[in-house]
Amino acid sequence: MKRPLRPRGSTGPHRHPAGPPWPGSEGPPGRRWPERPPDPRRLPWLTSLAVLVIQQVGSQAAATGQAGSRLPLDVYAHLLLAVGPLLLVLRHRGPGTTAFGTAAVATVYIGAGYPYGPVFLSVAVACFGAVVAGRRHAAWGALALVWAGHLVIGHLLYPWLPPAGDSAPGWAPELVVAAWVAAIVAAGELARTRRQEWTRRRVAEEEEERRRVDEERLRIARELHDVLAHSISVINVQAGVGLALLDSDREQARTALTTIKAASKEALGEVRQVLDTLRAPGTAPRTPAPGLDRLPELTGQAAGAGLRVTIETEGTPAPLPPGADLAAFRVIQEALTNVVRHSGSRVARVRLCYGSGELRLHVDDDGPATGDDGPTGGGNGLVGMRERAAALGGGAEAGPRADGGFRVTARLPLSPADTVTGAADAAAKETP
């Protein structure tokens, strides 16, 4: 049995305050950014510090090459170069606000006449992060603000803005800015698409893993129920016989106790086999799973509980796949257990009908219904029979007959290929 990805109660998605819900904030091992969504509780200090250093050092170098055409860097310029990277620290919590803030700072920096350079790096990082976080309109608006501000400053307001004697630039730089904007948007959209695809894939993997865990849990529950219900029913009947005959017929009481010992030993062995599978997943069981070859043993146990079982076979017997063989045995076992517990009849008839590609099982008793265990057909055992048959691509039904008896029928495919097709959907529909 596979282990679930996380404990129950912590499977809900972690919601990003500025974007879509994510199934987790860290992602599985081996996943790297940008596939893994950022954790908004962690501030990106390192990347923001790197942008700060690049802008300060790079702008100083750019100022040397633009001496005379742009103003030299002063205290106010260095402050503006620091504000953008400081805003980047909050880009995971407020991507839209960060994008507009860095765009406004860069526009003010250019309008103040300071040298062109890496001041736009903080804008690029902020807008890229906004697109990835799903705030594409905010990113586009911030980039449009930078471009429009550059157009207005360079072609309309330059006579009134520093440096003195500045002239309008040509249109070639505007094309460079447009290409720069398009590159940022394209890179952000690519990363955003990749992250959404990763999110969908991770959610699908978690759902598939959870489905497999649920199916394995249901399978183990059915196995334990079938084993314990049958054995304990036999033990209960024989214990009653032993108590009733303890004083009057000690030999018959001894026989009942012997039956109790055999039934309890078999039940303990099968329960131990299921538990060994849980403790050591992936290893083969030490004993084979029961099948129709153990019907004589099953009818012997029923006889020990006072139930005479007749078996009829129609058609040519064909080998069953392991899953169908186990399901057939469990269906007959559960049906006989119900006869012992709920029926006044002491005779049950089992009929095996081998047809074209399938096996039909019929278990009948003549009734009437007795006991205080509730209405026949309402227990978990009959539900488990339906689930077993449905998981193999077949079906099972149980209900009273018109003459007062009770009948259990099941249809199981003989081909292993048929047991796979539609098994998961059929089991899900049968599960209450």
Image (tube, rainbow, N blue to C red):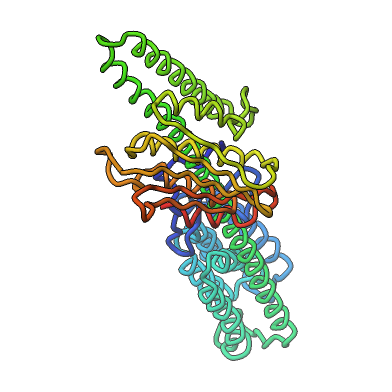
Percent position (x, y) of residue 203? 55, 55
Percent position (x, y) of residue 314? 62, 46
Percent position (x, y) of residue 8? 42, 43
Along the line of sight, the residue nearer the viewer: 161 or 378: 378
Along the line of sight, the residue nearer the viewer: 22 or 398: 398
Q: Is residue 414 above or below residue 182?
A: above
Left or right, 76 with reference to 372? right
Left or right, 163 with reference to 341? right
Q: Is residue 221 above or below residue 189?
A: above
Left or right, 81 with reference to 187? left
Percent position (x, y) of residue 79? 51, 62
Residue occupying the point 60% across, 34% down: 291
Name the quadrant containing residue 226: top left
Figure quadrant of the N terminus: top right
Q: Is residue 134 visible?
A: yes
- How many discs mark residues in the rendered view? 0
Q: Is residue 47 visible?
A: no
